[in-house]
Image (cartoon, coloured by chain):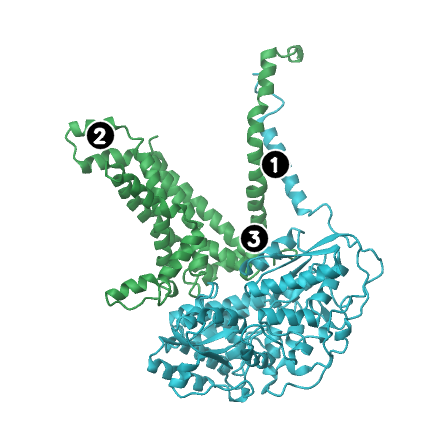
């Protein structure tokens, strides 16, 4: 059409040129994301259909890795332990850290000192924290066993006991993550307008009613954030498991990321490790989707 | 149509462009460095094949007197040879043509033995740089636990160091995949210079791909006051045939516990699989069948060895945590240093640490590890290899000649308390820096590496089956699994792994 051949007005031309600007700003990030995240994810997924020993060419074996997973006791234990670890860490940490945040939100003397103390484990690296707790748990000379002896309780195996190994790691996680969640709750609490509390008090609401009817509903976005990031983080746990138990004794405390490491770098089964990684990816995807689907619509921003 | 929507640069086109760029970057990364090395030597002719003068007559025939082989599977590999060549007073200069350019080579490895070992590396490199000032070699130190992972990533990325310290159990696998330089022509005759078991792990299909450099083994350290208190005299270094049997060792542990001076009878470093060489092969068992296609541990001998190890925790002879604390620095040695145990089944590389820690707190000595039918020992140490794609294969080979020459190896072993890997050095007196009086037991014990153990170490499925064995024995040690069930589980899981991942020569 003749009209389409006409030159665009100058304002439109400028607008058209300016369209590039946001893309230029996000391009480095997207490029890095594609190279270091998306590319490896796709590559790993493709590898999961191969038998690959790291330094030799992979051989396509279809779904064999996935079929083998179904009868692999180590993998099944890892799935079970990952779910147990997730339930045993995320919910208690969210609940306790909310209580601590409520206390630290009140006008207490020395509140800043308490906040620092609660947050301190967060700034300690996972490696240092794991080594410290390994020494606390060590049998029979660890600090914890020494304390138990004051009450006449015999030394426990802790990380060497197939039933206590995973709870020991959960305890470390609780200690390490409590501060982070407390700070997130505190930030959430401070976004709730004081006028709502004042109005509730004037209407005669008691503390319990205020908490259940005002505080908790208005913390829904924080709860959702804590839940989603907590569950994802718990599904990806590796460092404390690797350093405290190595997935043992036997494979009693094996979790999925440790199982990936074990297959890839101890047994040189890269294809098999990729299949476990793909399962983990879909588990996180489904659980996160479910959380947002179930709790997301309750959230008021 | 708005001006924006009629734009030639839609969001989709930008994303497609970025995806294309990302793909290009990924492809470029996979392609390796632009200067992917095609060997560029100053001389086109192949390297000379002459071995250093001091090592040209490596073969020998006499067995060491103290070793007592009883079965084919446990035949000491060191029996095969005895040195005849004298040590050269200085390092023989290489006769191969080397580059005159100034080059920088990277030799990657770890430092297991502390400052003394670091000093040994420094001394070696100083001596090399004096002779070859234009060929600079950097010893790049990496942490031992991540050593193989790191070099795996480097090789996959085509960015490997020129030389590195490898593990015995992956030499054949990597050689079969073409990542290691074939040393057969460049270092002719070297396969006959070393303890036979070590050399065996360095060859694949008759070609030499690695050189042994250090080796080590474990023996039994003890407090002299503890054994004196129960009236037991430990076998001397020339009394290997009197080394304690499983039953004698168990009685001694029980007596020590009854005495109650130390909380446990002994500590150990056997959790990572060393126990297999000492006790499984010592009991006459083996891990895999001779054709390497099946697990053979589920046998009366295998169960006997497993039961012996299980007794360590069942009878409270040793703290159970030591079994799983292998990766924790000094977790195996500290109970002995701190007086919590009367004995320690530990390595000779621990001597410097023990000496530093114990000082004059108590007197301590060494005797042989317990045995069953025969004395048998593990094979430690790390062989050295050259990357198949190094730009300077001859220069690397020349460095290996130098590094493995008797004067350099002797200096290294003396400083870092390692056992000699060369047959000529193995028969000579080494002036160890720390507690040389203890080394005689280790020198005798290293001669009892079973050839079947060396076979097993070299198998390409070794890493996978070792992981399974370790998991099952840990269940036995801390979760009450019986020795019989442990053997059965290892057999079932191990056979499945071997069926899926046969040794590279069985494929």
Q: Colour of chain B?
A: cyan
The nearer-to-camera label among 3 and 2 is 2
Q: Is residue A190 in view from this perspective?
A: yes
Calculate the distance from the C-alpha at mark 3 to the C-alpha at mark 2.
55 Å
Q: Chain of mark 1?
A: B
Q: Secondary structure at mark 2?
A: helix
Q: Is residue B144 above or below residue B367?
A: above
What label does residue A197 carry, if any?
2
* Snapshot quadrant of residue B169: bottom right
Q: Chain of mark 2?
A: A
Binning the other alpha carbons within 10 Å of mark 2 as few (below 14), some (14 to 19) or many (20 upward) gives some
Can you tell which chain is drawn green? A
Q: Secondary structure at mark 3?
A: loop
Q: Are marks 3 and 2 in contact (CB under 8 Å)?
A: no
Q: Is residue B174 above or below residue B304?
A: above
Q: Which residue is mark 3?
A: A48
User: For the point 62% across and 88% down, which residue is it?
Assistant: B65
Residue B172: percent from left, percent from top = 66, 66
Q: Is residue A126 above or below residue B476?
A: above
User: For the point 60% across and 80% down, which residue is it?
Assistant: B447
> Which residue is at the far left?
A204
Look at the image and tell me in which quarter the N terminus of chain A lies.
Answer: top right
User: For the point 76% across and 69% down, which residue is it?
Assistant: B92
Q: Are marks 1 and 3 in contact (CB under 8 Å)?
A: no
Q: Which is nearer the eye, B183 or B483?
A: B183
Q: Which residue is mark 1?
A: B19
Between disc 3 and disc 2, whose residue precedes? 3
Look at the image and tell me in which quarter the C terminus of chain A lies.
Answer: top left
């Amino acid at each position: 059409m003749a009209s389409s051949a006409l030159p665009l007005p100058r304002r439109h031309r400028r607008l058209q040129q300016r369209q590039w600007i946001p893309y230029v700003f996000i391009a480095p990030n997207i490029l890095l994301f594609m190279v270091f995240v998306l590319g490896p994810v796709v590559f790993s997924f493709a590898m999961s259909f191969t038998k690959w020993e790291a330094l030799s060419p992979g051989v396509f074996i279809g779904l064999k890795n996935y079929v083998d997973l179904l009868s692999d006791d180590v993998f099944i234990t890892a799935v079970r332990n990952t779910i147990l670890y997730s339930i045993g860490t995320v919910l208690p940490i969210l609940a306790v850290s909310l209580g601590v945040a409520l206390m630290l939100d009140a006008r207490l003397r020395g509140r800043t000192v308490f906040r620092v103390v609660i947050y301190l484990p967060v700034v300690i690296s996972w490696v240092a924290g794991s080594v410290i707790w390994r020494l606390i748990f060590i049998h029979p000379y660890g600090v914890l066993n020494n304390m138990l002896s004051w009450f006449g309780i015999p030394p426990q195996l802790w990380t060497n006991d197939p039933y206590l190994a995973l709870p020991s790691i959960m305890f470390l996680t609780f200690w390490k993550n409590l501060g982070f969640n407390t700070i997130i709750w505190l930030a959430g609490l401070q976004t709730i307008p004081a006028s709502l509390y004042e109005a509730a008090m004037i209407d005669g609401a008691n503390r319990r009613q205020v908490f259940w009817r005002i505080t908790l509903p208005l913390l829904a976005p924080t709860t959702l954030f804590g839940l989603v990031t907590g569950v994802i983080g718990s599904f990806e746990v590796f460092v404390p498991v690797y350093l405290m138990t190595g997935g043992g004794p036997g494979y009693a405390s094996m979790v999925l990321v440790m199982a990936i490491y074990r297959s890839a770098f101890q047994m040189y089964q890269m294809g098999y490790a990729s299949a476990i990684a793909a399962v983990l990816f879909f588990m996180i995807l489904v659980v996160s989707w479910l959380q947002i689907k179930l709790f997301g619509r309750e959230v008021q921003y | 149509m708005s001006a924006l929507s009629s734009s030639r640069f839609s969001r989709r086109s930008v994303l497609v462009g970025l995806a294309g760029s990302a793909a290009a970057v990924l492809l470029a990364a996979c392609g390796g460095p632009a200067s992917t090395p095609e060997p560029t030597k100053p001389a086109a002719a192949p390297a000379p094949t002459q071995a250093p003068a001091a090592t040209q007559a490596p073969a020998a025939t006499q067995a060491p007197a103290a070793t007592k082989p009883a079965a084919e599977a446990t035949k000491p590999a060191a029996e095969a040879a005895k040195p005849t060549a004298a040590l050269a007073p200085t390092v023989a200069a290489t006769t191969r043509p080397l580059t005159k350019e100034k080059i920088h080579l990277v030799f990657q490895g770890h430092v297991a033995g502390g400052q003394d070992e670091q000093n040994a590396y420094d001394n070696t490199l100083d001596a090399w740089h004096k002779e070859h000032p234009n060929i600079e070699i950097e010893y790049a130190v990496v942490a031992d636990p991540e050593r193989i992972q790191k070099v795996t990533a480097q090789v996959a990325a085509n960015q490997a160091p020129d030389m590195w310290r490898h593990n015995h159990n992956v030499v054949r696998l990597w050689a079969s995949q073409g990542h290691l330089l074939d040393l057969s022509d460049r270092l002719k005759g070297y396969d006959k210079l070393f303890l036979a078991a070590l050399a065996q792990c360095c060859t694949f299909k008759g070609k030499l791909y690695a050189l042994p450099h250090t080796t080590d083994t474990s023996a039994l350290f003890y407090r002299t006051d503890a054994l004196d208190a129960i009236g037991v005299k430990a076998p001397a270094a020339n009394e290997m045939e009197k080394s304690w049997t499983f039953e004698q060792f168990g009685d001694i542990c029980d007596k020590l516990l009854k005495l109650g001076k130390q909380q446990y009878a002994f500590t150990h470093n056997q959790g990572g699989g060393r126990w297999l060489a000492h006790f499984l092969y010592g009991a006459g068992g083996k891990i895999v069948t001779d054709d390497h296609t099946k697990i053979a541990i589920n046998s009366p001998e295998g169960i006997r060895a497993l039961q012996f190890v299980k007794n360590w925790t069942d009878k409270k002879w040793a703290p159970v945590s030591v079994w799983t604390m292998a990766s924790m620095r000094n977790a195996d040695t500290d109970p002995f240093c701190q007086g919590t145990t009367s004995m320690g089944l530990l390595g000779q590389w621990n001597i410097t640490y023990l000496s530093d820690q114990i000082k004059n707190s108590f007197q301590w000595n060494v005797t042989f590890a317990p045995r069953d039918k025969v004395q048998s020992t593990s094979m430690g140490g790390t062989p050295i290899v050259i990357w198949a794609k190094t730009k300077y294969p001859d220069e690397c080979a020349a460095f290996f000649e130098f590094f493995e020459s008797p004067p350099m190896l002797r200096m290294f072993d003396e400083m870092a308390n390692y056992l000699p890997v060369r047959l000529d050095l193995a028969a000579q007196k080494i002036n160890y820096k720390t507690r040389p009086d203890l080394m005689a037991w280790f020198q005798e014990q290293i001669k009892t590496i079973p050839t079947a153990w060396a076979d097993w170490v070299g198998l390409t499925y070794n890493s996978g089956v070792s992981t399974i064995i370790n998991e099952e024995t840990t269940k036995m040690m801390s979760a009450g699994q019986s020795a019989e069930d442990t053997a059965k589980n290892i057999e079932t899981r191990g056979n499945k792994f071997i069926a899926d991942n046969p040794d590279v020569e069985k494929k």
